[in-house]
Image: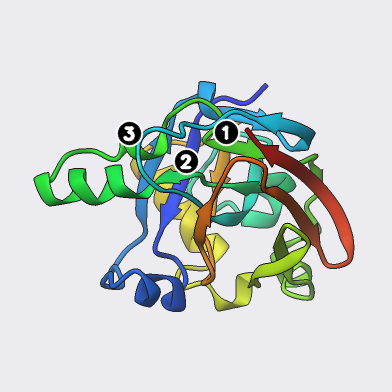
Amino acid sequence: MIQNVYCVGRNYRLHAAELGNDVPDEPMIFLKPSHAVARLAGQTLELPQNKGGVHYEGELVLRVRRSYEPGIKVDDLIGQMALGIDFTLRDVQTGIKKKGHPWTAAKGFKNAAPISEFIDFPGAEAAEGEDFTVRRNGKEVQRGNIKDMIFPLQEIVDYIGANYGLGEGDVIFTGTPAGVGPCAAGDTFELYWGERLLGSCVIG
């Protein structure tokens, strides 16, 4: 059962640049409600269509298998991984950022955090050997690799664990590479780890 849903913002330089955002000096963490989680199992996901633009952000998702303790290695802390989409109401986010308000309204709506099937985590070093990709309507729109992250996986889990805590069942959306963009009702998304399809959905 999924517990806390942590997300890392601006963890790829090219993504930060494409949105005109500064690169953070330390991991930028926000949360999504567990009710935002859905499965990427080929089904239709209903998303808000009356609140401005909806953007997709494909990400590697980590699943924690034990409680965090200082000094624990990420390979021992993480049991499984998946791919997910951080759906974002971009116009809403732009407005609340100007006001200095939390991002919940833009990032925490129902179905805003769909996740593929989980597979065994091979370890951080081995995971660098595969890219993950997002295909929209059959065309690749995002490609990422954890070696391109600003903050590596070990630093992410240490930061979250020390400041907020990590326990069994928590998941971490680790950040999105460049290529985010708008989606519309009827769009199909497929998420691949290497050549392996892990999840898909249709936007409703």
Query: Closer to the camera, 11 or 89?
Result: 89
Mark nearest the camera among 2 and 3 is: 3
Of callouts 1 and 2, the N-terminal one: 2
**How many residues crowd around disc 2 within 10 Å: few (fewer than 14), some, or many (20 or more)?**
many
In-front residue for pair 18/203: 203
Chain-order first, disc 2 or disc 3: 2
Q: In this view, does 30 lie to the left or right of 49?
A: left
The C terminus - image quarter: top right
Disc assigned to residue 146: none
Q: Where is residue 66 in the image (x, y as percent from the top left)?
A: 64, 34
Provide the residue designation for mark 3.
Answer: 104
Q: Distance between the residues labelled 2 and 3?
A: 12 Å
What's the amino acid at mark 1? Asp
Residue with the mark numbered 2: 6
Q: Mark 1 points at which residue?
A: 170
Under mark 2, the amino acid is Tyr
